[in-house]
Amino acid sequence: MSSQAFYDIRAAVTREQSAPFVIEDARIRAPKNDEVLVKILATGMCHTDMIVRDQYYPVPLPAVLGHEGAGIVEAVGPNVKDIQVGDHVVLTYGYCSHCHQCSDGHAAYCDEFYPRNFQGTGMDGETALQDAKGEPLHDHFFAQSSFATYALSLENNAVKVPADAPLELLGPLGCGIQTGAGAVINSLKVTPGSSFVSFGAGAVGLSAVLAARVAGATTIIAVDVVPSRLELALELGATHVINSKDEDPVARIKEITNGGTKFALESTGRPQVLRQGIDSLGLLGAIGVVGAPKLGTDSTFDVNDVLLGGKTIRGIVEGDSNPKQFIPLLVELYQQGRFPFDKLVKFYDFDQINEAAADSERGVTLKPIVRISQ
């Protein structure tokens, strides 16, 4: 650390819309107040990283993205109470902890969710990162910006995990895996003996399949167009799979479930798939929506079908989870062998970050994890 209380780091910088990530020398300031400085071991790559890189969401550039970080606490600010240097942590989304939604246990719907996760600075309007020329880099992405060797988070979004858990694997629990599993367990509250359909068998959709099995659903259906994903869904606990290129998923779901599914999740971000999900619900069925298309995207449904069927369409952010409780729960389930999300991931070195992004976008890899530090 220099005399000016900055750490020298390496960071993957997004300088222009849709441009490749460029690994650069940079600096990050020391933690203050309730901040935690984390040496990042590995970071998951999520669909949101790519849509921000491509400016579907207007995060200012140049920026350091990355929001599924896992690492070891290097330093803490003076107001940090429960986290210590050396703790193993998973970094999750930012939230204020004091608005009505946060106080009611729904931090994913925080009044300040957008600025804390997408405005490109801290809540004070300042960045913590500088490039090699001393120019500011937009950061605080999901209150972390973990495509870097070090990241700053707040104590409330740094979640301690057991030291005997495989830390480099755990970063995706901070967003993508938490979203799929939480949608099933926290939001939809899938019940034992029920039916559940995952529209999309990517990392989020297959995390939902894993969670539906944990929740005790006895009919678990995965819908996708990639045969290898459907094969993996069967391995992870799906009882049925449907390739929607080959057959009508709505008709097939109604046949399997004798009239319609009780629960469904849409993770593709495609309006036409959401419509299929709504149409596949049985009486009093509920569908969660986690797939994120471009801002302003419209979808449609048959109003009378929803009205007379008593159907529920539920938007879900971050699996509606309390991360301090839910992430350790997922770690425990993994360690018990009941939530094998490691079957979804592939590791990449830091200098392969653009390959990881390309493989994710092409569907070659379900959940890339980028090894940042050794």
Image (spheres, grey):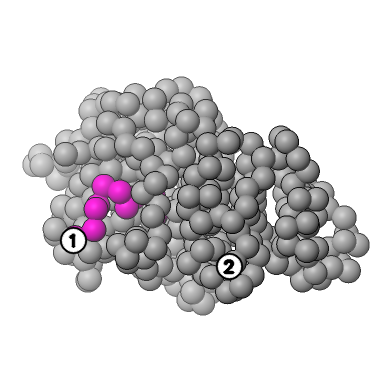
Residue in front for this viewpoint, 269 or 17? 269
User: Disc 1 to disc 2, how far (Cα)?
Assistant: 32 Å
Answer whether residue 7 is visible to the viewer in this image.
Answer: yes
Give the residue type that dot 1 points to.
Ala
From the top left corner, tell me how far across and down residue 153 is, in percent: 31, 54
From the top left corner, tell me how far across and down residue 276 is, in percent: 76, 49
Residue occupied by mark 2 = 217
Residue in front for this viewpoint, 326 or 7? 326
Q: Give the quadrant of the C terminus.
A: top left
Whether residue 326 sits left or right of residue 87 in the image: it is right
Which numbered dot is residue 163? 1
Outermost residue on the bottom side: it is 104
The image shows residue 4, relative to residue 303, as above or below, that is: above
Hey, which quadrant is residue 146 in on the image? top left
Secondary structure under the numbered disc 2 in the rendered image: loop
| The magenta stretch spans residue 273 | no
Whether residue 18 sits left or right of residue 299 in the image: it is left
Magenta residues, start to end: 164-174
Q: Residue shown at 23%/28% (left/top)?
A: 25
Q: Residues within 10 Å of mark 2 (few under 14, many from 20)?
A: many
Give the residue type that dot 2 points to.
Ala
From the top left corner, tell me how far across and down residue 299 is, in percent: 77, 47
Hey, which quadrant is residue 81 in on the image? bottom left
Whether residue 331 sits left or right of residue 192 in the image: it is left
Q: Residue shown at 40%/34% (left/top)?
A: 63
From the top left corner, tell me how far across and down residue 286 is, in percent: 70, 65
Q: Residue shown at 23%/32% (left/top)?
A: 10
The image shows residue 150, relative to residue 170, as above or below, that is: above
Which numbered dot is residue 127? none
User: In terms of secondary structure, what is the magenta stretch mainly?
Assistant: helix
Residue in front for this viewpoint, 341 or 157? 341
The image shows residue 302, relative to residue 149, as above or below, that is: below
